[in-house]
Image: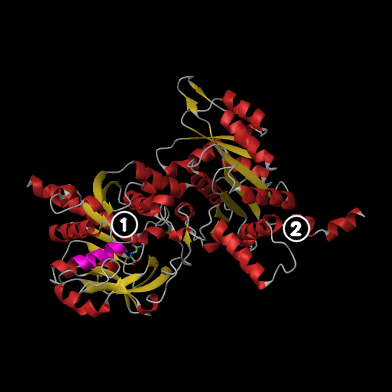
């Protein structure tokens, strides 16, 4: 009887077949504990041991993707090669692991419901009442296993957004519980990230919030396998013992995660704490090969021991929130390390730049980056920043909107095209140097309809940008924009000294502009920051920082002479 039951039960059959192992990372006590960094750090350690690892983020909000969110809501929107607009944690994953992610790596509640509702309309559940359990949870489990079922990975690390106990997170937590039951303990583990706060009045670290949050998780049927405890102070052995006993986890599975000076230290700290060892043990995987972190440590060494420093102005309108320009800031770190220079970023709010203060705001900058963005607010300040960089010979990098602003500035101040603009900012401009593509004109839906993802680009031979890309002629970069350089003006620009040095030959769209007479002036319609990683810093940022450093040296020499 028993044998028969085993062979008839598809769930139990799965248990034997599961080759890919799943690690879930949940969060307790508060948000912003850095689940993404812990997940990425563990993935890095497992990858460095030779395990094929990828990460996935499940977000409990109802937007289908974060593409329609203001950066103030959720930080930067990260774009993958396949054109998915995703959570910024995917940026951390790519930067740490140097492997591409895709649409499958980020799932939101909105997308889950959209898919279930579409199935219902197609009649796939005909006759049945469609419910959170089992329909929504089945959809979640399917999405979780999508990457695992490709057979490409040994381990999938899935980060569950939000905090345990949130109403929104419940279907995800229930799906994890079911998967743990279906696939078996050694195939699925749960890492719970919590906060161990320090009460200065009592002079003590407190474990109670962690106990409560582990209990909340247990109410949903999940026993955490590993606790990662965020803390500002060293957690004593005594407290670790207490956490282990009261939270019902093994002593070796209580991992301290103390504040780090850089996120890039976290994999090393997690290794010292034994996070990878205990995870492998619980997954019943061999831990014989120690992680090879040679390259990572070399990067850290350079990052922490710069030979000089430079200051770059980041001109944008979302500067109040560091996460808005996350990938750009990280790209500076990668490019700084390789150039052995510390890149100080001075964030300048473009809305507060005006005729009377711009010289003063730009003073002391060794390089200027005008950031991506949408809408009219803060545009004129950005135009002034470009003008300053162009006229004073300061290295300039314009990214996406930043490139468009460079074109507008040149049109107004060099070509003399008064009120030249992008039709995004002024629909009735007499000189639409940046304009909407024909095929974009009839699009009314805002979600997922921009030019997104990887597009090819051919570099002009002998251009600065070709040198920056180490002599390559063909590149592919990620996009996220609606408006384009207006080719009607191309010759006029070229004659006056701003050339199109990168073209998408299939569509004839301008991808890169540069000013040959200037020391280093490049505008890119794409987002190089999405592809910069620790192992492979992006050439545009590397080249920019190199030019910034050279500019600073030259200025210093000139002032000494
Ligand atoms: N707003 C501009 C466009 O849609 C630029 C977008 C961006 O900077 N990402 O084309």
Disc 1 packing (10 Å; few <14; some 14–19; many ≥20): many
Residue 418 occupies quadrant: bottom left
User: Disc number at residue 14?
Assistant: 2
In the image, residue 31 sits, relative to residue 437, either above or below, namely above
Q: Residue furthest right?
A: 1
Q: Residue at x 46, y 51 (%)?
A: 92
Residue 286 visible in the current orientation: no
- As drawn, is 129 to the left or to the right of 105? right
The percent position of residue 347, horizontal first and vertical second, equals 28, 48
Residue 379 occupies quadrant: bottom left
Disc 2 packing (10 Å; few <14; some 14–19; many ≥20): few
Separation of residues labelled 2 and 1 (CA atoms): 48 Å
In the image, residue 221 sits, relative to residue 136, either above or below, namely above
Q: Helix, strand, or loop for circle 1?
A: helix
Dominant secondary structure, magenta: helix
Q: Which residues are magenta?
A: 401-409
Residue 62 visible in the current orientation: yes
Q: Residue at x 40, y 44 (%)?
A: 300
Residue contact at pointers 2 and 1, CB within 8 angstroms: no
Please count the marks in the image: 2
Q: Which residue is mark 1?
A: 542
Picture quarter with the N terminus: bottom right
Q: Residue furthest top?
A: 202
Residue 407 included in the magenta stretch of the image: yes
The percent position of residue 500, horizontal first and vertical second, equals 25, 73
Q: Residue at x 6, y 47 (%)?
A: 561
């Amino acid at each position: 009887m028993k044998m028969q039951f085993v062979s008839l039960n598809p769930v139990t059959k799965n248990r034997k077949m599961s080759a890919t192992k799943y690690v879930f990372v949940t969060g307790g006590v508060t948000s912003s504990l850095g689940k993404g960094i812990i997940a990425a750090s563990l993935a890095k350690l497992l990858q460095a041991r030779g395990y094929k690892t990828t990460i996935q983020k499940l977000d409990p909000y109802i937007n289908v993707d974060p593409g329609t969110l203001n950066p103030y809501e959720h930080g930067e929107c990260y774009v993958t090669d396949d054109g998915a607009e995703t959570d910024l944690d995917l940026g951390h994953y790519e930067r740490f692991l140097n492997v591409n992610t895709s649409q499958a790596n980020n799932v939101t509640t909105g997308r889950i419901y959209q898919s279930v509702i579409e199935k219902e309309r197609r009649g796939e559940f005909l006759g049945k009442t469609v419910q959170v359990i089992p329909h929504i949870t089945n959809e979640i489990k399917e999405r979780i296993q999508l990457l695992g079922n490709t057979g490409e990975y040994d381990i999938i690390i899935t980060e569950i957004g939000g905090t345990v106990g949130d109403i929104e997170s419940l279907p995800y937590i229930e799906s994890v519980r079911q998967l743990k039951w279906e696939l078996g303990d050694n195939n699925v583990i749960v890492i719970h990230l919590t906060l161990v706060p320090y009460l200065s009045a009592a002079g003590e670290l407190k474990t109670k919030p962690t106990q409560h949050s582990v209990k909340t998780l247990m109410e949903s049927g999940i026993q955490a396998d590993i606790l990662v405890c965020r803390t500002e102070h060293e957690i004593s052995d005594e407290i670790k013992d207490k956490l282990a006993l009261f939270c019902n986890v093994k002593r070796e599975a209580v991992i301290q995660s103390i504040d780090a000076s850089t996120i890039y230290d976290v994999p090393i700290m997690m290794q010292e704490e034994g996070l990878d060892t205990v995870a492998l043990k619980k997954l019943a995987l061999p831990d014989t090969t120690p992680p090879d972190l040679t390259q990572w440590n070399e990067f850290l060494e350079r990052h922490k021991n710069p030979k000089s420093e430079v200051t770059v102005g980041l001109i944008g309108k979302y500067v109040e929130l560091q996460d808005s320009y996350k990938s750009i800031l990280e790209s500076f770190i990668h490019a700084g390390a390789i150039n052995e220079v510390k890149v100080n970023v001075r964030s300048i709010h473009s809305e507060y730049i005006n005729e009377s203060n711009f010289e003063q705001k730009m003073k002391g900058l060794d390089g200027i980056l005008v950031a991506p963005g949408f809408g009219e607010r803060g545009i004129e300040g950005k135009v002034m920043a470009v003008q300053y960089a162009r006229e004073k010979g300061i290295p300039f990098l314009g990214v996406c909107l930043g490139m468009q602003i460079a074109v507008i500035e040149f049109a107004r101040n060099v070509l003399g095209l008064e009120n030249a603009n992008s039709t995004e900012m002024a629909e009735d401009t007499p000189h639409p140097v940046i304009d909407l593509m024909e095929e974009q004109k009839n699009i009314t839906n805002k979600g997922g309809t921009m030019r997104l993802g990887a597009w090819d680009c051919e570099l002009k031979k002998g251009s600065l940008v070709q040198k920056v890309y180490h002599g390559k002629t063909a590149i592919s970069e990620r996009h996220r924009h609606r408006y384009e350089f207006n080719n009607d003006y191309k010759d006029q620009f070229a004659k006056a000294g701003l050339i199109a040095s990168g073209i998408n030959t299939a569509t004839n769209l301008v991808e890169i502009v540069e000013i040959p007479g200037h020391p280093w002036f490049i505008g890119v319609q794409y987002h190089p920051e999405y592809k910069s990683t620790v192992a492979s810093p992006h050439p545009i940022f590397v080249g920019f920082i190199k030019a910034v450093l050279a500019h600073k040296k030259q200025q210093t020499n000139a002032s000494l002479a």
